[in-house]
Amino acid sequence: MIIGKGLMAKAFEDYANYDDIVLFASGVSNSKETLKSEFLREESLLKDIINKFGNNRRIIYFSTCSMYDTYSNISDYTKHKIRMESVIAERANKYNIFRLPQVLGKNNKNQLIGFLYEKIKNKKAFEVLNIERNIIDVEDVYLIASTVLKESKKNEIINIANIKNDKVIDLVTTLEKICKEKGRYSIKNIEGDLDIDISQIKPLILEKKIFEKKYLINRIRKYYEWFN
């Protein structure tokens, strides 16, 4: 069973007919969200799902790696996701929580790369924060998560992320090449760090050879080059 219709739900669509799993992909997806009503909507739906299925099905939930980001103060979105993790751990008998960084796929308007693409393509001015982000293709999230689930590792919180971070300015440069446009931006320096522990999935990453040398540019081209 899948709850939701967005990016993650579509990526995991083959789980729709699983009788022993509820894949919850109907949560708040915009990391800039601040409306309490949106957080409460997700919490209410998640609790209902756990009440109905939490005794005999494994609950799969997608959380965030943003708690590892020290470039800014912890956001309402991050606090909410941490709370939802606690709700699942306290109420569900079986679960897997996957913490994700920036996930790249179709329709990324609410994500950083989608924002940068629109600014560059439409020749609009914007500010580039001199920070690092971690980018992963949604198809690789599926590959890693589905492998973990097949290995029957239950009641774990696992970070699924790229083996390395990329500077935002490198994202801009890549999109400039794809758009064949020079971005109109200023750069703002910010102190901080983004350190995501992927030791739990490192053997799987090496076995599947997921992150090739030109991973970033290959994946951005995959989703954006056909627009141009």
Image: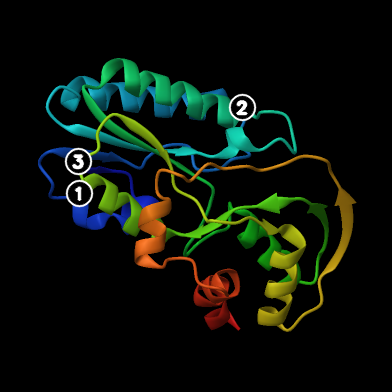
* Residue 228 in the image: above or below residue 48: below
Q: Which residue is mark 1?
A: 150
Query: Quadrant location of residue 23?
Result: top left
Q: How many marks?
A: 3
Image quarter where the C terminus lies is bottom right
Secondary structure beneath label 2? helix
Q: CA distance from mark 3 to mark 2?
A: 32 Å
Crowding at label 1, few (<14), some or many (≥20) Cα neighbours within 10 Å? Answer: few
Q: CA distance from mark 2 to mark 1?
A: 33 Å
Image x and y of residue 37, in percent: 51, 25
Question: Residue at position x 53%, y 41% from top?
Answer: 197
Q: Earlier in the sequence, mark 3 or mark 2?
A: 2
Secondary structure beneath label 1? helix
Q: Which residue is mark 3?
A: 152
- Mark 3: which amino acid? Ser
Comparing 158 with 105, the one in front is 158
Comparing 37 with 200, the one in front is 200
As drawn, the label of residue 76 is 2
